[in-house]
Amino acid sequence: MGFAEAIRVALQSLWANKLRTILTVVGVVIGVASVIAVITLANGAKMFVVQKIATHGSDTLTVTRMNPVIFTGEEFLRENKRKDITFDDYEYLQRTCTRCLMLAAELSSSGKVVNGKQSTTNTTINGWTANMAEIADLNIVQGRALTPMDDDMGTHGVVVGYDIVDNLLPNVDPIGQDIRVDGEVYSVVGVGERKGEVFGQSEDNYVDMPLSTYLHTHGEHQSVDISAKAGMAPGALDNAIDEVRALMRSRRHDLPGAEDSFGILTNDTFISLFNQLTGIFATVIIGIASISLVVGGVVIMNIMLVSVTERTREIGIRKALGAKRQDVMVQFLIEAAAMALLGGLFGVLGGITVAEIVTHVVGFPSSVALWSVLLGLFVATSVGIFFGVYPARRAAMLDPIVALRAEL
């Protein structure tokens, strides 16, 4: 029997038992769908994060007291003992850092914004020096940005996001309107461009005020973050990091050989942390999905064994007519692989569909990677072949005389 003929016979057998075939591939569908959905969502999130971080400039560094992601309690306790980074540290770097083209300082918290009977909650309240808007690539679409004079004078002018405009200042010109931020009255001087949502969370729910004003109204006993631009020249960022690290270690009296009592973050730091987090998440989900694939493979093997028993007389007739053991084995392997491949195809479609639903419902980004689709189909087919070997070998080893005596 030729290979093409073996495929035709195998597909006819599967078509003749449609319900059994569908029930057999369910485990493979679930496993492949889980893997494809996770990879699609993780790939989309990675591309989104890389694009978002890139908008903040590949030449930007941030000095912070604690790292944004801490994995162990020991790390938290160690970093929590660090001294605060102060506004004086920011002014010191402004005076001494020769490789920093621009520096800015910021503080952030969550608060409540009120106008009349309308209010917002969990609004991000930023205290910025004037240069922070340029470092953060904040484009002003109405009014003006915060200026050094605002910071020097401690004015109550603020730049707001579109959530504040849409919810608290609808149908009016927001410039010059008064709002209450954590009980204090501020005047809107500018509106930032609309940014949309990230992972279902709005990026337009914020209020930016001068850092000096923030320190006065929200308290001075907080650690500030210091951001700096190094320029796009080759090696500029690394040189700026080295200089900032040396200046900060000297100012904070870090002992030679001791670790830094502060953190320096760059785009690569955030991307690495994100990859680490998504990698852990993907490993766990793929591990669980692998169990589904194994279960699906076991089901395929059991169904194929039942099929061998049901078709014993058919196998005997084929052998009596000249079919070799290899022909019988190939036919049953093709049936097992075809069921697994069918499950893989439905699994790929199901995984992509699930990822798209999550994207539309939650706003979590997704991106289909061709390699993940090919991987899913390859793994599914491999599972079918692996678990189909034993039933196929058992069918091939049947004695034709004994098989012909089998009762129908």
Image (cartoon, rainbow, N blue to C red):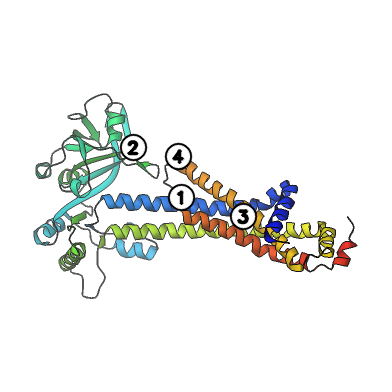
Amino acid type, label 4: His
Does 349 sit left or right of 260 as displayed?
Answer: right
The quadrant of the picture occupied by the C terminus is bottom right
Mark 3 vs 2, N-terminal side: 2
Q: Which mark is residue 121?
A: 2
From the top left corner, tell me how far across and down residue 316 is, in percent: 84, 62
Q: Is residue 349 above or below residue 186?
A: below
| Mark 3 and mark 2: Cα distance apart in space | 50 Å
Mark 3 vs 4, N-terminal side: 3
Secondary structure under tag 2 reads strand
Mark 1 vs 2, N-terminal side: 2
Q: Which mark is residue 360?
A: 4
Kindly identify which residue carries mark 3: 341
What residue is drawn where x is 65% and y is 58%? 337
Does 184 sit left or right of 149 as displayed?
Answer: right
Amino acid type, label 1: Val
Secondary structure under tag 1 reads loop
Q: Is residue 67 visible?
A: no
